[in-house]
Amino acid sequence: MKDQYNSERADEADNFLHIAPVKEDWGGDGRGRMNLSGRRTAISKEYVPRQYQYFDTNTVPEEKVWRISGIPENVTSASSRLLSWSDCGASTSKVVLPSQFEAPSGIFTADLEIFILSGTIQIGEWQLNKHGYSFIPAGVKVGPWKVLGGKEVQILWMENGPVPLSYRYAESNHPDARMSDFIPALNSKLLPWGKTETVQFVQANKKWLRKDANGGGAWLLAILPHYDGRYPEIQCYNEDAYCLGGYCDIGDFRFVKDCYGYVPSFTTSPWHRTDDGCLFFIRVDRDLSKVSTVLSYKPGDT
């Protein structure tokens, strides 16, 4: 296996690392490399522009035997619920690694983000616990992987494309890997809360996990009790959202723990409100501090 990381496989990694970013459907140049545009979801097999998709992830059919393409056959399989995906290969899934899961170190051919929903996993020199986060650029060597504590690990597993992710054995980082973007292990509990920098969420706080090249990225959003957005909002960006606790009523949908939302660009998202507050994991492909990325919309306005 170790001898198979030859020039052919290096060329495959090179091909990915030099593919031009996919442009976002709001007109962005794709520098953030999140590939949230034009996704299908578990409740809509075709992409529906400007229409939000909210659903309980526990109702999504589970793939009982899931493994990363290219991973050695002797590695114990996991299970997965596919939440959203793009034709370019990017996707968001909820993956469960069993307690006996172990995998060797290597590289991936696409950028990977992981956020721990429960359990503990060792990745190389670092441990990730509940609400831990890692961003692994294509070509960066990571691992070996090992689930700790005798309990399964639930992960939000986010493959960023622009080609399907696969594993390759490697003894070192690829020379063209974006090492400056690598976030090996982030304990979100140690990060400070800050302002959201968007007018609509004054009664909320934000923890940045990663800020990408165009100002978007991943963060935790805590919406405080008694929040009332009063009006719908037009979202001029693409959004991945997962509820970690509490609730927020968005229109007639009660967004509670384990619910997922995909919001394509230029969606009119319904009125947000909560009495008790809630905590979300959020990914967005645009800088929300810029003017006109989030717009309050009062029906009847012209």
Image (cartoon, rainbow, N blue to C red):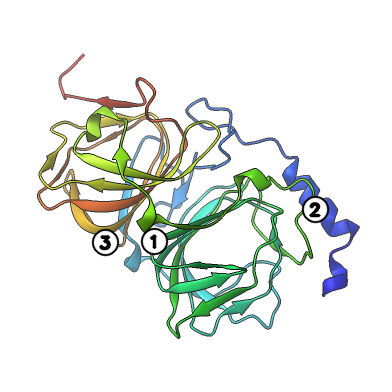
Answer yes or no: is residue 22 visible.
Answer: yes
| Residue under numbered circle 1 | 131
The residue at 45%/82% (across/down) is: 149
Q: Is residue 141 left or right of residue 285?
A: right
Instruction: State the residue in front, 194 or 213.
Output: 194
| Residue under numbered circle 2 | 12
Q: Is residue 230 placed above or below 179 in the rendered structure?
A: above
The residue at 39%/66% (across/down) is: 130
**What is the crowding at mark 1: few (fewer than 14 residues within 10 Å), some, or many (at least 20)?**
many
The residue at 39%/23% (across/down) is: 290
Name the residue type under label 1.
Answer: His
| Residue under numbered circle 3 | 257
Answer yes or no: is residue 254 visible.
Answer: no
Q: Is residue 7 placed above or below 128 in the rendered structure?
A: above
Name the residue type under label 2.
Answer: Glu
Q: Is residue 132 left or right of residue 177?
A: left
Label 3: state its secondary structure.
loop
Q: Looking at the picture, how far across and down is residue 137, in whole percent?
A: 63, 50
Label 2: state its secondary structure.
helix
Find the distance from the CA under tag 2 to the CA under tag 1. Answer: 33 Å
Q: Is residue 263 placed above or below 26 in the rendered structure?
A: below
Name the residue type under label 3.
Answer: Lys
Find the distance from the CA under tag 3 to the CA under tag 2. Answer: 39 Å
Residue 57 sits in quarter: bottom left
Q: Looking at the picture, how far across and down is residue 164, in whole percent?
A: 64, 54
Q: Is residue 168 left or right of residue 210?
A: right
Q: Looking at the picture, how far across and down is residue 113, in whole percent?
A: 53, 54
Find the distance from the CA under tag 1 to the CA under tag 3. Answer: 14 Å
**What is the crowding at mark 3: few (fewer than 14 residues within 10 Å), some, or many (at least 20)?**
some
Instruction: State the residue in front, 211 or 56.
Output: 211
